[in-house]
Amino acid sequence: MTAPTLRTLTVLGATGSIGVNTLDVVARHPDQYRVFAISGATQLDRLLEQCKQFAPRYAVVLTEQSAETLRGMVRAAGLETEVLCGEAALEQVACAPEVDTVMAAIVGAAGMKPTLAAAQCGKRVLLANKETLVLAGKLFMDAVTAAGAELLPIDSEHNAIFQVLPRAHREHPYHGTLQQAGVRRILLTASGGPFRTRPLETLAAITPEEAVRHPNWSMGRKISVDSATMMNKGLEVIEAHWLFNARPDEITVVVHPQSIVHSMVEYVDGSVLAQLGAPDMRTPIAYGMAYPQRVESGVEKLDLFKVGRLDFEEPDLKRFPCLRLAFEALRQGGPATAIANAANEVAVAAFLDHQLDWNGIPALIEHTLGVCCSNASDASIDLLLQADAHAREVAQQWLRER
Ligand code: NAD
Ligand code: MG
């Protein structure tokens, strides 16, 4: 293998689960990767530690108040990192000419604008923030094409699919259809989360503590709840639709409790290609960072003798109504997926705050989709953000009035 070129990264959401894993891979290859900027909403102590270890030129926080605090900490530690704050600063560090690679790992709709900015500036975008595609899939994919940006999916399933798709299709998914690439369908695997076998009548009693304890993956709180409701898989169906130019009927969700097969592609000749590995996000992160080469990621070797068996099941839509709702939103098109996502964000926050029970999550999404129904097909960014804001209001009102 030839030596990879030196890459300079901005890590948006550096303090989160994906951000920390990204910096872990960076630390394994100090000669190959430099960190230009990091960002985080809170956790200033962690940001300071990251400044010490990676000496980024910029650290970006949300508010002027936390910027002042972090500035004091950085100065006291004798570091040269400059502290910035706010949305514009996130876009600035995503688009800086020194940067060639942007890890988009902010959680939720808040990640959309800086991720879009990175694409518009023609960067290599390592896309963990699936909400960007759920909110503004068409706009984002158009921006990637127009600016010649390089898009590498980090979500483990999409990374797996990317790895086993024909290179021409994965790099230019809108030059032709999946069918023209010889693909019959995408098999998106899902662990089924912690409640796959829990008696249906006990679901209403699920607590936030139970919901954030995922059996296979260690992740942020919001995505852990999404995994347990399978809304995460719903968002991933939408993500796969945009990333791979796949129609909803070309995507099949397969429950696979061991999380070893990260997804599969079925070809017209009957071949099914899969990517397997230990459930550790450093594999897709390292793949995106080094593409098309490979670098060591620190991930434990897959021991198939220990794994022993791999199981596959059809998802139960009674147990996981969020998955059905996400498919419905995707089929509806336009801002519907943004509306479903916004309602889900409100619902998950209320659930984590003990204000909504488990069954209230899909109920709130279904209500919001019903009230906000819109079929505008070619939505502008302003219209999508309006739809997102309106959906949040409708969802909050339902929470207050029910
Ligand atoms: P996390 O909650 O652990 O971290 C989120 C990061 O975003 C933190 O750095 C936080 O400070 C920052 N942030 C939060 N709110 C913000 C705001 N309003 N403005 C700016 N920054 C803000 O989340 P995570 O698990 O690392 O997930 C990050 C993204 O990656 C999500 O979109 C998630 O769906 C996706 N993803 C995560 C995993 C995983 O294994 N964790 C897997 C696949 C995809
Ligand atoms: Mg995933």
Image: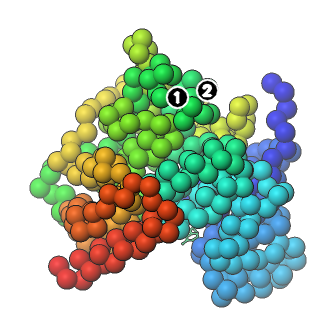
Which of pointers 1 and 2 indicates the residue nearer the eye? 1
Question: 231 and 206: which one is in front?
Answer: 231
Give the percent coordinates (x, y) of residue 166. 57, 23
Real-space Cα separation, disc 1 to disc 2, in angstroms? 9 Å
Does residue 10 appear left or right of residue 390 in this picture? right
Residue at horizontal 48 percent and vertical 44 percent from the top = 242
Q: Is residue 100 above or below residue 64?
A: above
Which of the 4 image quarters holds residue 53? Answer: bottom right
In the picture of the structure, the residue carrying the numbered disc 2 is 168
How many callouts does the rendering have?
2
Q: Is residue 168 above or below residue 47?
A: above
312 or 60, which lies in front? 60
For this view, does 45 lie left or right of residue 220?
right
Identity, as a three-letter code, of the amino acid under mark 2 = Ala
Give the mark nearest the N terminus, 1 or 2. 2
Q: Nearer the viewer, residue 360 or 395?
A: 395
- Tag 1–tag 2 contact (CB < 8 Å): yes
Residue 176: give its label.
Answer: 1
Q: Quadrant of ligand 1?
A: bottom right
